[in-house]
Amino acid sequence: MTRILSVASECAPLVKTGGLADVVGALPAALAALGDEMRTLLPGYRAVMKQAKPAKSVATFPSLFGGPARILAGKAHGLSLLVLDAPHLYDRDGGLYAGEDGNDWPDNPERFAALSYAAAFVARNGAGDWAPEMVHGHDWQAGLTPEYMHAMTDGLGDVPFVFTIHNIAFHGNASADRIGALGLSPTRFTADHFEFWGQVSALKAGLTGADTLTTVSKTYAEELMTPAYGMGMDGVLRARRADFSGIVNGIDTHTWNPATDPQIKTYKSARGKRPNKTALRKEFGLGKSDGPLCVLISRLTHQKGIDLLLDALPALTWRGGQLALLGSGDTDLEVALLERAAAEPNVSVRIGYDEALSHRMMAGGDAILVPSRFEPCGLTQLYGLRYGTVPLVALTGGLADTVINASPAALAARAATGVQFNPITAEALANAFTHLCDLYAQPKVWADLGKNAMKHPVGWETSAAEYAALYRQLLPG
Ligand code: ADP
């Protein structure tokens, strides 16, 4: 049994803005099934403080980055939590990373330096009667952990640090004049440690300081070592190739289970989707049509290829295909989508974040669209597989690893689960819509796709075993 401290800035179902939260929330139970014990250190945002009860103080800091703080041990939703209660950093209106005006909190470097410091503190001193054998940090918010661990032990006797990249786009940079305020060592402000083009990079600190690096799919791991995807960190990652691997995410197959989902008319085979489709059309104000009903649930950003979708959409709608879209994000994309929906009866758009609706969409849609320019793992295509909702995805990252393209050979072998397109352009996406409509027009072929999709394993079992094996390799003897 390995004892692991997980450190992250979000964790479902307590606080979530994206897929990171799902992974951090699901891994402890998946590992527990294999005999490992994971506790999760989170910032004491208001939502976390409300849910983590009863909470017992296991460490106090008279002053941590500008105010008093303590670490509380508690439980919520079956998770064993350590919560960094630091009201001056986390007790505020607004989002996890940005205020209500949409701008990043100016003290984000300190807010997540504090989280990383608390992780290093627990690694060194334990938390109450529990002491981790290693730390597993996620994304830049946990990236400074090895720096603080190194400072606390002078590099001697650090426990191993595993670092997982969920999205390389966020570097957690701070200007160099904050090195002192962040409690970092100026002698380590070098390209080997946390210096990145003259700035402090929390992400780079994690990439250089970790004993082992992972990301959330094998294809994304390979992509990250190329200039096109590495966002400036490709060289750092190439240098660490021997320690870098991809482990694809699973999904929570209890929450996402078409046979029991309380949001839908439950079903065990893709044939059972029909009443959900009727209900979904009604909910989105879409009429009857001959083509596939496509759904998309996403942050609305350039990464997610929403602009490509807008350009390619006529290839779907002229064949009678429909689109029901749920998302929020960049204002210009929201506006463009709403304008399209107003002009095109086969397109309907909901701006917002709505988990219950996302379940009904997954059950009612024929196909789920994920036209991302890059996608570390992607979760909605996995929900789609589970619900027999055929994924149409860009050939990148985890989308490449989790969907089997409906090539003639894969169709003949009855292995195909979806449609992939490459290169990631509006033209290729339009061609993929044509392919999708052709497949949909052949009821036997389409039924096979749904059946194959629902057979594809999407739970955590395999991936949790890969993490457990990786942890064991880091322990002595
Ligand atoms: P990312 O982490 O890049 O946003 P992922 O596909 O890995 O993308 O994870 C996104 C998660 O957030 C999924 O669980 C998805 O269902 C959910 N999600 C995204 N946007 C919405 C929305 N508007 N309403 C409900 N759920 C959403």
Image (cartoon, rainbow, N blue to C red):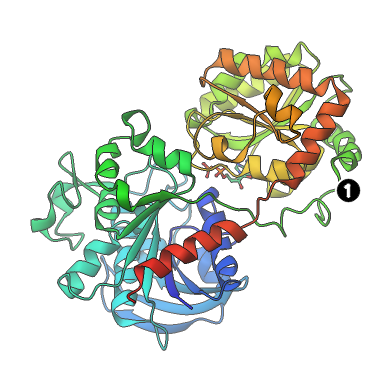
Return the residue nearer the eye: 111 or 477. 477
Q: Quadrant of residue 473?
A: bottom left
Tell me which residue sits at (60%, 21%) in the image.
309
Return the residue nearer the eye: 189 or 47. 189
Instruction: Report whether 395 appears left or right of 445.
Output: left
Quarter of the rendered structure image containing ligand 1: top right
Instruction: Report whether 288 appears left or right of 167.
Output: right
Residue 451 lies, with reference to residue 266, above or below; the image says: above
Give x and y (percent) for residue 162: 36, 61
- Count of residue discs: 1
Classify mark 1: residues with Cα within 10 Å, few (<14), some (14-19) or many (20+).
some
SS at badge 1: loop
Give x and y (percent) for residue 142: 35, 59
Give x and y (percent) for residue 435: 71, 18
Residue sitting at the far bottom:
129
Name the amino acid type tagged 1.
Answer: Lys
Give x and y (percent) for residue 431: 64, 14
Q: Which residue is mark 1?
A: 265
Instruction: Report whether 131 appears left or right of 158.
Output: right
Note whether residue 107 is visible.
no
Q: Quadrant of residue 393?
A: top right
Tell me which residue sits at (51%, 21%) in the image.
424
Tell me which residue sits at (58%, 61%) in the image.
26
Residue 219 lies, with reference to residue 113, above or below; the image says: above
Q: Quadrant of the C terminus?
A: bottom left
Tell me which residue sits at (13%, 61%) in the image.
185
Residue sitting at the far left:
187
